[in-house]
Image: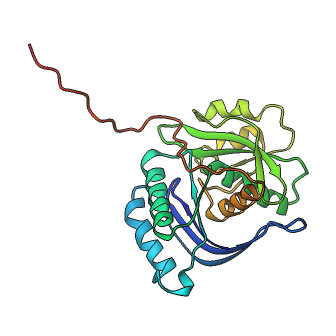
Amino acid sequence: MRIVSIDSSLGSQLLVCEATGPAADAPVRLEVLADAEQADSRRHAESLGPMLRQALGDPGSPAARLDAVVAATGPAPFTGLRAGLVTARVVCRARGVPLYGIPSLDAVARTALDEADAQGAQAGTTVLVLTDARRKEVYAATYRARGADDVERLSDLHVLPPEQTLSLADDHDHLVLAGSGAVLYPSLAHRLGVPVHAPVSGDAASQVRLALARVGRGEELGSEPLYLRHADVHVPGTARRAR
């Protein structure tokens, strides 16, 4: 199954891969065919089109076959998230393939749990994901592993000041932090005395694994964006007449 995965939670990530699984006795396997990334959080619209053209090539070529698109649904800043989802929907409509949405923090959690496992983390490890929400706030949620490719969210998705995320760490004995917010506010990991993994705001490869695991269970993966708060820019109301 050939999949394009798009994440625009902070910068822009694009991945084209051949994916197999999951099977009863094996996790999802990914063969990366092309990938691209740029870190500028204000150039999503300018970068995603050229990334796609380079990654997919001539639409008529057999090498450009496509079976699905996976896209991050946030939470993330409004403009970047919208650019990624619009790009994903255009590709799906042009190619006649399904779109699967995955929350950005879920993907960060899966990547962090993989890193923690590789370093010998204890079974039942909880990951507190914090990603940059700007305005001196973070998006936050807690997770634990659900099999080899998926995660289970243990809390609601929040947007809040970094100090308030400490309450989300309560009652979790084996905890790690993850995400761009954990790097932006290093005092949190210091106060909790825990390591930081996956210092990102999204992960295009983990999105594919999560999507295939959930589709395999028959879940519906909607692509509505998770903004959690209103956009910074608003359409002005009707002008009032001076009297």
Q: Relative to 138, is 242 above or below?
A: above
Residue for point 62% across, 49% down: 103
Q: Is residue 124 left or right of residue 212?
A: right
Residue for point 81% across, 51% down: 145
Return the residue nearer the eye: 240 or 20. 20
In the displayed orientation, state which residue is furthest to the front.
96
Return the residue nearer the eye: 130 or 209. 209
Percent of width and height locating residue 158: 62, 35
Percent of width and height locating residue 240: 17, 21
Image quadrant holding the C terminus, namely top left
Percent of width and height locating residue 156: 68, 35
Q: Quadrant of residue 212?
A: bottom right
Residue for point 59% across, 40% down: 139
Percent of width and height locating residue 50: 41, 73
Whether residue 39 can be seen here: no
Image quadrant holding the N terminus, namely bottom right
Whether residue 4 can be seen here: yes
Return the residue nearer the eye: 219 or 238. 219
In the displayed orientation, state which residue is furthest to the top.
243
